Amino acid sequence: MTAKDFRQIALSLPETIESSHMDHPDFRVGGKIFATLDAPSKGWGMLKLWPDQQAELLKADSKAFKPAAGAWGVRGATLVRLSAAKSATVRKALADAWRNTAPKHLAGQLPAAE
């Protein structure tokens, strides 16, 4: 998985736009961030997940995923080491992060099986 792959998957989700926050790219739906790139540093991404979704990822692949620091991580913000992550796993996690953040009227546009 590369940053280019991550970006392409994120931007393929309905009504997603790329913006910038704190000098790194972010991906938004309905004006809210659901993922970022190059944070905390280059080669990493962040996904806005729920704690149970985060726990599932950590159990499945602790080399590619870890909680973000502090309260953000406790609440589900999950870091992904792009070079260690499998594309299919990141695709599902990005879709989950998108669904978690999208306004209700949009969330139904992306089937849960994505």
Image: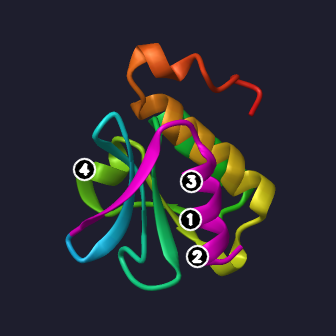
Number of the label disc, if any, that sits on residue 3: 2
- Counting every numbered tag in the picture gives 4
> Which residue is the site of mark 4?
71
Q: Position of residue 75 (x, y in %)?
A: 34, 41
Specify whether 34 is left or right of 56. Answer: left
The residue nearer to you, when weighing 72 against 93, is 93
The residue nearer to you, when weighing 14 against 73, is 14
Q: Under tag 2, what secondary structure? A: helix
- The span from disc 3 to disc 2 (Cα, nearest Å) is 10 Å
Mark 4 or 1: the one toward you: 1
Q: Are marks 3 and 1 in contact (CB under 8 Å)?
A: yes
Q: Are marks 1 and 2 in contact (CB under 8 Å)?
A: yes
Give the quadrant of residue 63.
bottom right
Q: Position of residue 98 (x, y in %)?
A: 50, 38
Q: Is residue 7 magenta?
A: yes
Which amino acid type is shown beneath numbered disc 3?
Ala
Q: Position of residue 70 (x, y in %)?
A: 26, 58
Q: Are marks 4 and 2 in contact (CB under 8 Å)?
A: no
Query: Relative to 49, is 61 above or below?
Result: below
Q: Earlier in the sequence, mark 3 or mark 2?
A: 2
Please say whether residue 36 is visible from this viewpoint: yes
Number of the label disc, if any, that sits on residue 7: 1
> Which residue is the site of mark 3?
10
